Amino acid sequence: MPSDVKEFLRQAAMQVGAGGSAGFVEVCIMHPLDLVKTRLQLQASPTAGATKSTAYYNGVFDCIRKMAKSEGVFSLYKGILPPVLVETPKRAVKFLTFEQYKRFFMFGSDKPTPLTFSLAGLGAGVTEAILVNPFEMVKVTLQANKNKMVQVPSTWAVTKQIINESGFGLNGLNRGLTATIGRNGVFNMIYFGFYHSVKGIVPEYKVQRMIANVVTRVWLGRTLDPVKEFLRKVGIGFVSGTLGSIVNIPFDVAKSRIQGPQPIPGQVKYRTTFGSMMIVAREEGFAALYKGLTPKVMRLGPGGAIMLVVYDYVYAFLDDYFK
């Protein structure tokens, strides 16, 4: 096997392993906030006809409290199986395709530019969205169910129900695909573009190493400060995830409305991405397009940092191990 092909396959395998690890860790830690975000996005404002009741959530912690009380503590992990099943291949695909798109968008430059990182992130997000949308459809259906955990149908049962009733197409298991593409594409464009651009600007934290004795001091050069370097990456990752969440949330709201239960059974109110945004803005106000922003930022701010840091460290470990 040619050496360049062998090196490409080695790097691809490390990208898949590191990306899968990053996604699995992130979803296990942050899933409850994703569920809260979906619940807040699904409920209409009182001005749009919703009735305030014990099932109406007035914020993140009110939602957590009411869910734990009426549905059980473990209800905060409703719908976790679809993202767990898809998160490893999803993040693996995200990071693998990001690296490949990065090569494509060099535009003759000898090193990646901020535009390279942003366009590669956009491409990775679109690819990721096409892969995960069926899982998102099942996840939102499960998260919208307000019964107690023991009464909630299984992931497989919900999947079969959607397929039997609506099929695999854009009205069935792939409903909301355009909104998912918009959400993931915009998020990853900002997420990767900001993180890699700023990481290249903000200097690494290094410390001077030396061996000292009574007679002389022998300088060994500079090495990374592990604690400060870890915090540097976490900080940049947190800001990257936060910015991406703020910009892409209207697509996320539209996606939740399209994939979730319709207000009137049998009538499709939320059909297209931009049409759903217009309906929400017209009936509930422009601010309603930012429903669920707090739990989304609480999840994808630190969650974004977790993914990028885990990816960097696992990739470095694999790189050393397979040299």
Image (cartoon, rainbow, N blue to C red):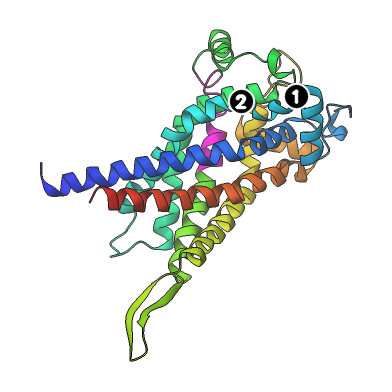
Task: Place residue 296 in its image quadrant.
Answer: top right
Q: Look at 33% across and 78% down and name the residue there.
A: 221
Write down the residue under mark 1: 72
Residue 114 visible in this rendered orientation of the protein? yes
Q: Secondary structure at mark 1?
A: loop
Along the horizontal axis of the image, is 279 left or right of 113? Answer: right
Residue 15 marker: none
Q: Secondary structure at mark 2?
A: loop
The amino acid type, in three-letter code, at marker 1 is Gly
Q: Residues within 10 Å of mark 1 (few under 14, many from 20)?
A: some
Write down the residue under mark 2: 79
Q: Looking at the picture, does residue 225 appear above or below residue 269?
A: below
Q: Position of residue 148 (x, y in %)?
A: 74, 18
Q: Look at 56% across and 28% down and name the residue there.
A: 136
Nearer the camera: disc 2 or disc 1: 1
Q: Position of residue 316 (x, y in %)?
A: 35, 53
